[in-house]
Image (cartoon, coloured by chain):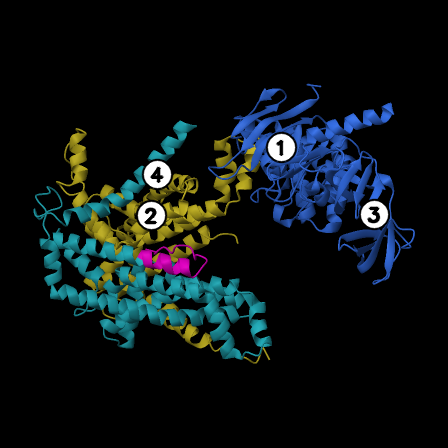
Chain colours: A blue, B yellow, C cyan
Amino acid sequence: MADRTIIRFEHVTKQYDDDPAVLNDVSFEIERGKFYTLLGPSGCGKTTILRLIAGFIEPSKGKIYFNGKVINNLPANKRQVNTVFQDYALFPHLNVFENVAFGLKIKKMKKSDIEEKVKEALRFVNLAGYEAREIREMSGGQRQRVAIARAIVNEPEVILLDEPLSALDLKLRTEMQYELRELQRRLGITFIFVTHDQEEALAMSDEIFVLNEGKIQQSGTPTDIYDEPINRFVADFIGESNIVPGKMIRDFLIEFNGKQFECVDGGFHPDESVEAVIRPEDLQITTPEQGKLQVRVDSQLFRGVHYEICCFDEDGNEWLVHSTKKAVVGDNIGLTFDPEAIHVMRFGETEEEFDKRLEAYEEAGHAK
Amino acid sequence: MQSRTRNIYLIPYVLWIVLFVIAPIVLVVYYSFFDIEGHFTLLNYKKFFTPVYLRMTLSSFWYAFLITVFCLLLAYPTALLLTKTKHKQLWLLLIILPTWVNLLLKAYAFLGIFGAFGPANALLETLGIGQKQLLFTDFSFVFTSVYIFIPFMILPIFNSLEELSPSFVDAARDLGASPWTTFRRVIFPLTLDGVKSGCQAVFIPALSLFMLARLIAGNRVITLGTAIEEHFLVTQDWGMGSTIAVFLIIAMAIIMILTGSRR
Amino acid sequence: MRAKRKLANVYLIVIFVILYAPIFYLMYYSFNSGGSMHDFKGFTLEWYKEVFHDTRLFIIVLNTLVIALLSAAISTILGVIGALAIQMLRKRQVKNSLLTLNNVLIVSPDVIIGASFLILFTIMGIKLGFISVLLSHIAFSVPIVVIMVLPKLQEMSPTLVDAARDLGANRWQVLSKVVLPFITPGIFAGFFMALTYSLDDFAVTFFVTGNGFSTLSVEIYSRARQGISLSINALSTLIFLFTIMLVVGYYFVNKKTGKSNGMGVRGR
């Protein structure tokens, strides 16, 4: 276990002067060779974590371990990590080759070795032959690749990427998502990727840390986080969701909209107030008679792959439905869903408690 | 529509340019071909290439160079440290404030400071070096000039340091560069434009300072500026004065081209 | 790490001390009854009395202020017109060459400006004195105003003018209701710069001023050449206080008008 861990945060807090902490008592572990994503809205502390790992800032409290050693005060230039910056930070007074060679030259590597390594790195990012170009002659996507080449050429154990795709247009961004993921597999080193784009996070990561207000809200694989968000923030931030207040009658039976539905969640107190999440794509349109919920279609938008249909039930709750079939605005329709589609969230539950509950009722489920 | 609307603003502005920019330069060049009696002559140029004037030009350049170098050596660290202070705008304001004090008053202050019984000599005395003649030496001239020009060097360097994206510094550190290497390989090259405009703001006026030379250096330091002033206002030899001015203009143009940024 | 910080602070403090020492040195001895800039004998306001009783000096101060205000006002108008003219030009080349010509007077050494203006006024038959000094001050202030106003004009989105025209404004209304208000901070900064350039100028004035007319700088120069007189110290203390008031005023004007134009620096 210990040797798989490369970076560990222990109760790390970062605070500037008397302002509220940017990062508040955060602990986590990063394992070797995986693709991690720090996801959250701006100001959530994700970039702070990155800068702490890179060594540009020091924690106010807590310890940061790298390969088992505390690195709190180790200057950035002595760390085995390299960063791909949001604005790429390519040195404008150096050309592509000199930019990529920057780190190697500082290590006083032999000239012929530098040349070879830079060429290889550029080939790796599909920029062979661009050595003599000036940075200002490169397009956004190309700059992005130079920045990546400049980081990987130093053979770091960890690469940090600070929203590197945010400046690119949609098409290029999607392309680069594939490329980055592929690059990480080929290199086999740890990538820590910072983004506020949940689709990007879901598409690329092995593990996602969802952050908000200086705290990690939830961590896990993309499917874990998507299917079982721990709280309203995560459910709302990742994907689209219908969140309604409800009551657990008993385990595996929930009441909302004045009706009772079967579900697959357990470990609650009887009659506990909860919130239920149903993803829009898990709702199917049917006739009002057959539907578990009766709603009226308020508006709809064509999204290409599907229609996004906005409906309201009698109590005025909004229901978002993703359907490949068109609905008619003003119609009364029925909505139906499987028990698995309902995900129940407890108020104020921490990640630890959540995991424990999950384990407990799953065991109980097996015992039955 | 657009093309028909004439740019009437151009008229007064171009008039100003013609009258106060182009005409004076043309007149200076024109006058450089006349001697003191008003006859056309090339003698002024011939005279300029005699050892007396060449030596004067050389020493003028030498002093301007010294002043610029000392300014740069003192100003760069100051600017760099200023960018790292809290309330840097306030500190910057405090750097700028002395430039609002009339140059002559500052020069006058140094008359007292470097005087025989002034604080500079008092300091030398306590250091055990003993009283020295400080006023009317080239040392006092260079010192006073550096004092007067240093804010003009600090400012452009400070501005270019401020413009420098901090992520460049982060990137260099990230790639393994020590603070010194980061400075040498990234910060300094990327703020070269500021350094250049600072040098320009110091070197050109330093070439032509005549009041400082007169007040502080007595007549020990003769700059191109002093010579021009002397020819125009004392000996009334406008032809020779204009000739020196022509060379000063040429020097100025060369410096502008050399220190001009690529942008 | 901490030692380095300390060293850095010491360096900055030394620089600041050197920058301010001469100024405070001057001010300190303006209260010296001893009559010299060393050996502080005792406190006196005698030199200030002397300054205030000197009618010649009073007239010179008045001259200086009149020249400064007039030249700043006129050069601001000319400069704004110039900036508008440059902004309206379409061809890049013409624009750049006008800008280059504009900057000639900013980078030229004072001696050259003074000498060439002296020739110019002599040829044009303008008598050296108030008019020649005023004209030169206007002349060298115009490019500064242009430089301060032009960035504001460039900052202004062209759609702003389109919007005004779309809403029915004629050309004059576009200028007075949209463009001028937008560039007001630049105009203020330009006026202020022109004012201080004029107040501070010595070399150019020295060349083009005749016998009967003098400004403060020229007067200080001729007095300083005769050696130390503590009434100059008193005068400089007063000027310094006045300057600080101006700077504070400028600071607030800048703050009030929003975005700072960057604290201007006087050249030369």
Task: In the rendered view, tell whether residue C102 sits above or below residue B255.
Answer: below
Marks 1 and 4: same chain?
no
Which element carries disc 4, helix, strand or loop?
Answer: helix
Pick the front one: B133 or C162:
C162
Coordinates of residue A21 in the picture (x, y in percent): 53, 36
Residue A52 rendering spot, x and y as whole percentages: 57, 32
Q: CA distance from mark 3 to mark 4?
A: 64 Å
Q: Residues within 10 Å of mark 4 (few under 14, many from 20)?
A: some
The amino acid type found where label 4 is placed reads Leu
Amino acid found under the numbered disc labelled 3 = Glu
Residue of label 2: B94
Task: Tell whether position A147 is magenta.
Answer: no
In percent of width and height, residue B250 lies at 39, 57
| Circle 1 SS class | strand
Amino acid type, mark 1: Asn
Which of the two marks, 3 or 4, is nearer to us in this view? 3
Residue B243 in view (yes/no): no
- Asked if B7 appears above or below A275 in the picture, the reply is below
The reply to whether label 2 and label 3 mark residues of one chain is no
Crowding near the residue tagged with mark 2, few <14, some 14–19, many ≥20 C-alpha atoms within 10 Å: some
In the picture, measured across the screen, residue B135 lies left or right of residue C95, that is left
The kind of secondary structure element at disc 3 is helix
The residue stretch that appears in magenta = C247-268
Cα separation between marks 1 and 4:
34 Å
Q: Tell me the CA gap for discs 4 and 2.
A: 12 Å
Chain for disc number 3? A
Q: Which residue is mark 4?
A: C12
Question: Looking at the rendering, in which quadrant would you find the C terminus of chain C?
Answer: bottom left
Please give the residue where the numbered disc 3 appears in the rendered image.
Answer: A281
According to the image, label 1 marks what residue? A82
Name the residue: 42% across, 40% down: B80
